[in-house]
Amino acid sequence: MPNRGVLVPPPRAARILEQRTRLLAARGAAAAPAEARLTVMACQLETEFYGLPLGAVAQVLPLMAWAPVPGALPAVLGLFSHAGQMFCLLDLAMALGRAAPQGEGGHVLLLRAAGPRRFALRVERVAGATEVTPLQDPGRPAERALTGHALTPPELAGGRRALLGLVDSHRLLQPFMAPALPSGA
């Protein structure tokens, strides 16, 4: 059977091409990745909120007694033992360069081991684990230990949407890590 070309009127051909273009565009949009969502442990320091990657937090405890370390950096509150492990307790506000907290209470976040030392963070209040979407242009520059910002879900911030700083736990702990010994020492 010979191949006969089908003649399509130009207006109909334009409609078919437009329809195919829309279908292809919709298929590409469906294949686009969804917004990057992060699961964080949201913490409150006075009126500010910060989120640490949930995978970096091993456990949340009520604030406990610690032994001060003479000559330590101001953010180092001291050392304490939990479940047979020694932890260096840092104040999150001071480690981020904020003012020292006014209250006595709070929570302790035990962090997963970061090398040979174990760290814990004192925070004013743990708001809870939540999923957040990082803001593309929050209007605030990222700081040394912050990788960006997101908005807190209203249920964690008393019904309002507050800005949440996204903390990079490795960059936060870097100044408190023991310096590497030179080889042969």
Image (cartoon, rainbow, N blue to C red):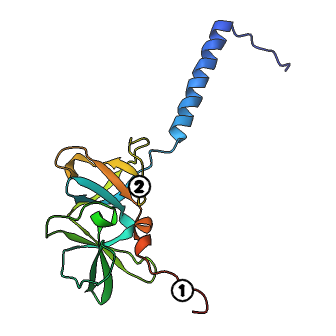
Image x and y of residue 151, in percent? 31, 46
- Residue 135, compared with residue 104, is above or below; it is above
User: As rendered, which of 42 and 36 lies closer to the eye?
Assistant: 42
According to the picture, the residue beneath numbered tag 1 turns out to be 181
- Residue 90, compared with residue 46, is above or below; it is below
User: As rendered, which of 176 and 159 lies closer to the eye?
Assistant: 176
Q: Which mark is residue 143?
A: 2
Residue at screen point 84% across, 21% down: 1
Image x and y of residue 35, in percent? 44, 45
Per the model, the C-alpha gap separating discs 1 and 2 is 29 Å
Among numbered discs 1 and 2, the one appearing first in the sequence: 2
Q: Which mark is residue 87?
A: none
Residue at screen point 18% across, 82% down: 65
Amino acid marked by disc 1:
Leu
Q: Secondary structure at mark 2?
A: loop
- Residue 17, compared with residue 123, is above or below; it is above
